[in-house]
Image (cartoon, rainbow, N blue to C red):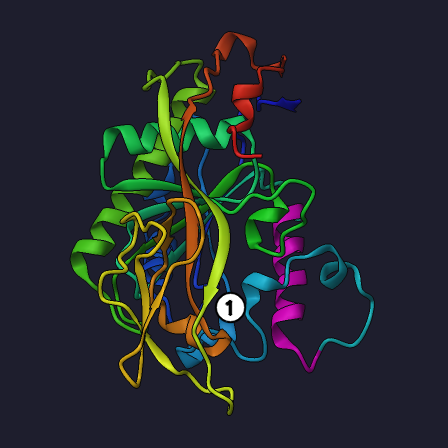
Amino acid sequence: MTQTPEKIKQPAIFGGIHGNELTGLYLIKKFLKQPHLLERNTFTASPILGNLKAIEACTRFIDKDLNRCFDIESLETVSDETIIYEKQRAKEIKEIITSNNVDCIFDLHSTTADVGLSIILVNDHPFNLSLASYLSQINPEVRICSFFEKDQPTSFLNSLSPLGFAIEVGPIAQGVLDFSLFQKTENLINEILNYLDRWNSGITTSQSEFVTVYQKLMTVNFPLNSFNELNAFIHPEIQNFVAINPGDSLFISFDGEVINYTETQELYPYLVNEAAYYAYNLAFHLMKKTEVRSPILLVGLRNTMMGNDNLHCGLM
């Protein structure tokens, strides 16, 4: 069972966890210059820059992906981490979160993949699903994805707080800005903060009974040759959030051979052809499309434990 928050006292918004993802980075810079934009009746959200050295260099990371450095082992190891900058920065970010009593984290990312506006849940907290459900209801462009795996720890920034989630927007190239996507992301943040403020004020936000959630089931890697080099393109029919079925084409080799999907269930690709994933030979994720009951969080019952199984996302 998970307890819903009585109030969100200190939300934080992060950008630049990856230094070349400029949408979130420049939104944070905007908020730092205009902090009144993050003010609401019941709180003022904190804008925080992520990977400072990678931001300066306009690269994803310096030594290691910062968004893979928030696991317990990395954060609690007492050693000289001066060689791996991101491990030290992760510890600094944890200290910022702890010292400022941050209780809700939103992490802004952008991708070269055509995902539109997507939310990535990393746990099964009903408050996060309720908020995500509301956002997808008021904006059909918003899709909810879950990377939550029961009893599996995560090393993402969002693991530092049970409340909040990542926002992944695209398509946009690394190291560039796009006005439309920037504006859509800022609008999404405004809706999030308004929702939190209404919650703190005891106002229940109505939403649909069911919501679509894409649950990550597996990762698909590029085919490699004997020299451990890429040996195929992603098939042009593979698109984000478009169903693939047994027998459908996944890849086309450089020799023209078509490689088909051999799993037995209909799944949905996500983060197709993300540029940063080429370093790991990762082509895309495959997600299961599910319809789950939206949590009904009653403001008058905020101090009670939510025991309804439907409030645990149905994503086990």
Picture residue at 27% right of the left edge, 70% below the top: 173
- Judge the density around disc 1: few (<14), some (14-19), many (≥20) Cα neighbours within 10 Å: many
Please give the residue where the numbered disc 1 appears in the rendered image.
51
Magenta-colored stretch includes residue 90: yes
- How many numbered marks, from 0 up? 1
Picture residue at 48% right of the left edge, 16% below the top: 297
Q: Which one is nearer the viewer's eye here, 197 or 122? A: 122
Task: Provide residue 85's location: percent of width, then percent of height.
Answer: 62, 76
- Look at the image and give the residue range highlighted in magenta: 82-98
State the quadrant of the C terminus. top right
- Residue 221 is left or right of residue 275, and the answer is right
- Residue 178 is left or right of residue 201, and the answer is left
Residue placed furthest toward the top? 300
The answer to whether one can see residue 55 in this image is no
Residue 143: quadrant of the picture: top left
Picture residue at 53% right of the left edge, 79% below the top: 62
Task: Provide residue 194's location: percent of width, then percent of height.
Answer: 34, 29
